[in-house]
Each structure stands twice: as C-alpha cells, then as structure tokens.
Image: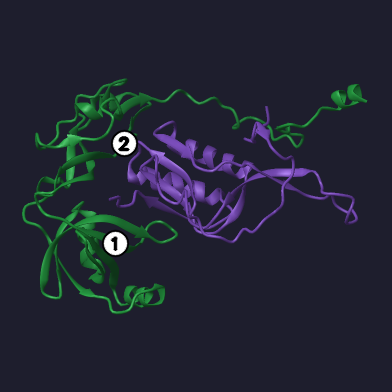
Amino acid sequence: MSDGTPTLTAETRERTGSRYSKRLRDAGKLPAIVYGHGETPVAIALDHKEALSHFAKGEKVFSLSVGGKAQNVLLKDLGYDYLGNNIVHADFARVDLDERVDVRAHLHFVGNAKGLKKAGAILMKPITELELNCTVANLPDEIEVDISDLDVGDAIHAGEIKLPKSTMKLLNEPDAVVVQIVVQAEEEAEGEGAEVSDDAAQPAVIGEKKDDEDKDGE
Amino acid sequence: MPPYKIPKRVKHRKEFRRVRDRKATKGNYVAFGDYGLQALEGCWLKSNQIEAGRIACQHYLKREGKIFIRVFPDKPVSKKPLETRMGKGKADVDYWAARVRAGTILYELAGVSEQRAKGALHRVAMKMPVRCRMVGRRIEV
C-alpha cells in the first residue's frame, strides 16, 4: 500500500439495474458496490476518472467516504465490457487495516537483462502477479523484480522473489517460473513457401468405420 | 501435411452453421503476451487468413519476439459446387474456420516494444476480414 490510504468519495445509488447503471456511466460515474463484515451491501457510484487513475496505479486499499462516513475498503473485483477493456463496475469489501487477506500483487520487472542482447532471445513472463497473504496495511501496490543478472536459459521462480515484508506469505507454488529468457528456435519455412493445395487432407472422424471394415462385416 | 492448420481428429465431419453475431465472453483479453490484436466484429476466420496474418507478422518482426495465435480453425464449412441444384445432401467441406466473435483476441505478441508491436499488428490487421484494434494488458485485481 502506498503512503497514506487514497480517499474515494462516493454517493449511494437509490436505483439499481442495468438501465440506471448505464445512465450513471454516461454521466461520468462508475457504478460500484460495498459489502462485507456482516453489514448490508450498499450500491454506490464513484467518479469514473478519479477511480480509474487509482486503479491504474495498482492501488487496492481505499478510504471510502459514503455520505460523510469513511470506511476502509479493499478492491475485490472489476467488471469489464464485452471488449474487455473498459471498466464498467467495481466491487469493494469492507476491511480492517490489521486484517489478513489473500490478494494478488502486480510484478514490476526492472533492469536490462544481459541475456536479451543475444539474437532471438526474448523475455517470457508466465506469471505477472503474485498471490500473497498479508495484512491490509502492508499490501504492496507492486513488487519489484530485478532481472538485470538474468542470462539466456536462466529463470526466476516465485520462491526466489524477495517480498517487501517478512510477515507476507506467498501463496503461489515456490517452483513456479515467474520470468525466464528463452531463445526462439528458428521457425521452419513451412507455410511461407508451401503451395496452397485445394485437395487438403481431411481430419480423421472419431468412431467412423472405414470402407474396408464395412465390407468385411458384410 | 496440409499447408494450413486443421484439426487432427473431429467428432463429426460436417456441422451446422449456427448463429454468428454474438459478443465474446471468453478469450477477450490479453493473457499470454504484452500486446494483442482484438477483432471488433464477428466472422469465420479461415485457416489461410490466420496463416497469412502469422506470416505478415513474422516478416515484419524478423524473428524478434514471440507470437501467440489465440484462435484455431476447428469449424468445417461446406459449400455446394457451382451450377448445382439444391438438395442431394449436405455438400463437401470447403474450408476450415475459427469462430470469431466481437472482442476475441486473435494474436498476441511478447518480447517486443510497443512501437514494433504496433507496426506488426497493423500488418496483421490488414490481412484480417474484420475491423481490428491493438490492445494491451488490462488492469487485473
């Protein structure tokens, strides 16, 4: 979590449903919901631009002011539109700052890996987020991973990443590869020079009897 | 081996055409690489079009970075020969296609700069039968 919990101001939504949510979005608002701690879920509306600027920085814990009453909340989920790029809804859970939660922290790779200077070498990142169990107050916006010493064939595993606080617990498999440098095998010229055949081979049909077998059976 | 990718085994040789105009609910975000090419319309993407896009990308990048192809042509599309009367059963398979819905990510690129990815995916988009746009990774919680 960055220095000082960012504050979000919200207003309660009197009317819910897709029709009213759409009107809110058109007016520059972001529909959201706050739930948890055994209290009644509250439908709220945030300023879309302000909320997005915080989400883009990786911030997850907020001091949410609804109707003059402030409460600590954790960003739990984001809803996207069908093209998967525009945020249309946000879920917040009420939390205490000393509460332990399972969260995902974004990885930020720093440094120029020496292995990337070789021809055909590329940096593969199978995992871009680490799953952690930590207190809400210690929740990191992102975790820095230094890759400057990484050579071709080398890899950094989840267990090798130094977590910002000793109280944090890693939930990923320690052997999981986070980042590695691989050299791409030269692709065969297949397809580039190959002629297009109209009489392409057809795939085998599962469970279909061949003609010879049918004749034998008769 | 056929020049374009087709399935190795299928359960049925031919299939119905089915509804096409729907929006993608899965495969609509960049999952493997850093940048992706997203279809903004639905279509049946032929196997030769997928291959043309791959070749265009590789020619531009010259073995730099890695390309991920997110769609596979597993749909057989049949077509009757010209000047044939209707009826007499379903025609032979003409080509294989991938079902692409609005929002589907077609290709992804890893290990290249944004500038290079933009150039490469623009070339690929020229080979596609639908409008496309370049997208990056989205904010994950």
Q: Quadrant of the N terminus of chain B?
A: top right
Q: Amino acid at mark 1?
A: Ala
Q: Amino acid at mark 2?
A: Ile
Q: Which residue is mark 2?
A: A127
Q: Are marks 1 and 2 on the same chain?
A: yes
Determine which quarter of the picture holds residue A31. Answer: bottom left
Instruction: Check the image and report above or below for B87 versus B92.
Output: below
Question: Helix, strand, or loop for circle 2?
Answer: loop
Q: Which residue is mark 1?
A: A90
Q: Position of residue B123 (x, y in %)?
A: 49, 47
Label 1, label 2: how many angstroms apart (C-alpha)?
24 Å
Q: Nearer the viewer, residue B110 or A66?
A: A66
Instruction: Say which chain is purple.
Output: B
Q: Which chain does the residue under circle 1 lie in? A: A
Chain A rendering hue:
green
Residue A181, given in percent of the width and then of the height, sits at 32, 26
Q: Secondary structure at mark 1?
A: strand
Q: Of the numbered discs in the image, which one, if any, rests on residue B100?
A: none
Q: Nearer the viewer, residue B8 or B64?
A: B8
Q: Residue drawn 35% across and 36% down?
A: B111
Where is residue A132? Give x, y as percent: 21, 39
Mark 2 falls within which chain? A
